[in-house]
Image (cartoon, grey):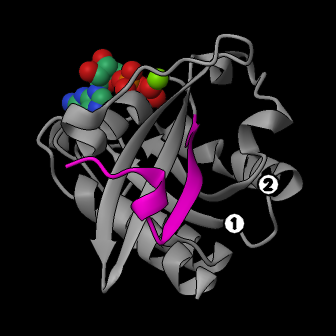
Amino acid sequence: AALDDEECDYLFKAVMIGDSAVGKSNLLSRFAREEFRLDSKPTIGVEFACRSLRIGDKLVKAQIWDTAGQERFRAITSSYYRGALGALLVYDVTRRVTFENLPKWIRELRELADPTLVIALVGNKSDLVHMREVGEEEGKSLAEREGLCFMETSALENRNVEEAFLQMITRIREILK
Ligand code: GDP
Ligand code: MG
């Protein structure tokens, strides 16, 4: 059941980021399930979804922001990142260019977000085995070099989606201790 903010031990913001069409919105709606809310903020063109979780003995509510397509024009403003404690940085394992753009996104996150930001790198569309252009090891080694969490997912098959978000949220929770 959804929890009120007052009942939560922690409430925090995280953001979805990465190239257009890598699957950010589908990953978020999988994770947020029936709690997905199109609480649009038309002035800044973002949407967000909330999900409450129990981590250990604490109730954590994650408010996760999604873009409304601004990433296509690389027009994401600093207000999108403001106050975020976590980011799910997504690429598409079937489109190499989305992997090659990751350093730009990492740079932008480090410039505009909080320095303690927890970044979870996510290689999505792992179900499309015959179209793969980026190996799992490549994602893993980039994540290691940059100090990020890493997971390959399939929003389509609902594979590792929960795990990817939980990895990020658990790490944020550790920092908040
Ligand atoms: P966004 O622009 O990053 O928010 O990407 P979307 O969530 O809108 O997804 C872009 C396209 O990729 C859509 O056609 C989705 O159906 C498709 N898609 C998203 N995730 C997956 C996945 O895990 N596997 C496959 N095969 N397609 C996916
Ligand atoms: Mg989207």
Q: Residue furthest top?
A: 42
* Vertical comparison of 117 with 18: above or below: below
Asked whether residue 4 is drawn in magenta, I would say yes
In the image, residue 150 above or below residue 43:
below
In the figure, 144 relative to 134: above or below?
below
Residue 54 falls in image quadrant: bottom left
Residue sitting at 62 percent across and 45 percent down? 100
Residue 33 percent across, percent down from the top left: 21, 37
Asked if the residue under mark 1 is in contact with the one under mark 2, i.e. CB atoms within 8 Å, the reply is yes
Q: Which quadrant holds residue 144? A: bottom right
Give percent across and percent down for residue 103: 72, 53
Task: Confirm whether residue 51 shows in the render.
Answer: yes
Residue 49 lies in quadrant: top left
**Residue range of the region highlighted in magenta in the rendering:** 1-18
Residue at mark 2: 113
* Other residues around mark 1 within 10 Å, as few (<14) / some (14–19) / many (≥20): some
